[in-house]
Image (tube, rainbow, N blue to C red):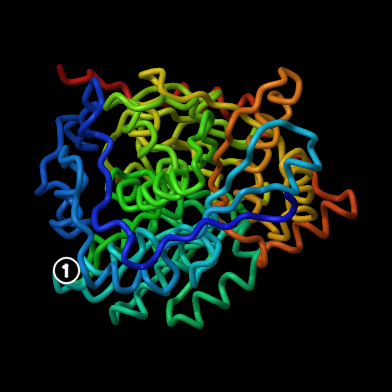
Amino acid sequence: MSGQTKFLLQESQMPKAWYNLQADLPKPLPAVLHPGTHQPVGPDDLAPLFPMELILQEVSTEREIDIPEPVREIYQLWRPAPLFRAHRLEKALGTPAKIFYKYEGGSPAGSHKPNTAIPQAFYNQQAGIKRLTTETGAGQWGTSLSFAGSLFDLEVLVFQVRVSYDQKPYRRAVMETYGARCLASPSNETQYGRSVLAERPDHPGSLGIAISEAVELAVQRDDTKYALGSVLNHVLLHQTIIGIEAMEQMQMADAWPDVVVGCTGGGSNFAGIAFPFIGHGLRGGPKPRIVAVEPAACPSLTRGKYAYDYGDTGHMTPLTKMHTLGSTFTPPGFHAGGLRYHGMAPLVSHVKELGLLEAVAYTQNQCFEAGVLFARNEGIVPAPEANHAVKGAIEEALRCKREGKSETILFNLCGHGHFDMVAYQKYFAGELKEEAYDEKELAMALSGLPSVVEPV
């Protein structure tokens, strides 16, 4: 068979609940600590940033959390999302492996990010909130929250990392089309942004800095909350709709993955595809290998330290235990802006410490090479972030070829690259530089990790 095989669920088969991996873990997640006292935070500590429903989801250990009907109704604009079998890619690689991919690029924003943007906007509206502040790297999260804000009549203010703001002007245009305001970060609109610019006027920005700016403004007004597109437990929870659907579709295909692959930056799309399969294994089902693929220029899982750290550069957020490169670390300006974050989601980090996932890192050009091969065989041009998952899946397929194994590989193609063609042009022109982080800067950032006595 050549071409693609598509596996589709009916709208009536779309999941009615998200899956919470915390219910099945053999060891609970380390406590979140207050940035000032270093004591475990309670709901009241998080209330300035998030509505109570999201705070309750953040700390929940219930296995299933119902998806509100207004959220499911909007999900139906693009969900259930299709699962494909990549026959042409398999043939091009000459592998005996079967390659499946879950495609999240069909959402209005072109990525998986609306899976959490919609419920976050819904819960904030229900709580009487009028404005949301957020950060974005490549712009996929900013685009998604802007879209969600337009549906729930919320004002949205987006701080976009300066290097991506300059690289990807069309993302900004889409945010503005949805009614949001988008600023390059660091900006002159916040005290923290001004302090960064005073020290370095040409600062390229980082997600950590943009988070600090968004948080600073969120806590100043009662009608404003902060929304995050990755890292936090409730965000990862919302994304599990990806893996839940994929499990149903794999059964339709009369197959089950031996390997599940996802790209990782903050951890949301990776958790979305991987957590339901991990949980299924922990409850006695088959246990596929879980492979997290990250950029070599920002390798939090493969080079970071598992320690308590701030989620932002300005040290305004609570302390979480995660794989981190240090909150002051500024990743170089490679094109996968959604993966340029100094830390990994605490829950993903915890899963790695439990030995439930493997992590690998690849360079920018290696990932673009994989993305081009995929596009020329399967027809979809992946986003630079998604290219990492493509690369990971191809490497697994080539391993099967070397070993003569007919394994089944599943990966999450988390978004399309239609707004990233400048990067592809540079790749074809041989101008896509390998951005390497500064080892001295990494050492300095890690040496500055906060000194924390972990609660017993």
Residue 443 placement, left or right of 116: right
Residue 126 placement, left or right of 73: left
Q: Nearer the viewer, residue 176 or 83?
A: 83
Q: Residue furthest right?
A: 429
Q: Whole-percent x and y of residue 41?
A: 15, 38
Figure quadrant of the C terminus: top left
What amino acid is at disc 1? Asp
Q: From this viewpoint, is residue 185 visible?
A: no
Q: Whole-percent x and y of residue 261?
A: 54, 36
Q: Is residue 422 above or below residue 390?
A: below
**Within the image, what quadrant is residue 409 found in?**
top right
Q: Whole-percent x and y of residue 215?
A: 32, 56
Q: Whole-percent x and y of residue 400?
A: 69, 25
Q: From this viewpoint, is residue 449 visible?
A: yes
**Within the image, what quadrant is residue 365 found in?**
top right
**Local SS, label 1:** loop
Q: Residue at x 60, y 28 (%)?
A: 407
Q: Residue at x 28, y 62 (%)?
A: 120
Q: Nearer the viewer, residue 69 or 252?
A: 252
Question: Which residue does the numbered mark 1 point to in the structure image?
Answer: 222
Q: Residue at x 21, y 25 (%)?
A: 28
Residue 277 placement, left or right of 132: right
**Within the image, what quadrant is residue 96 found in?**
top right
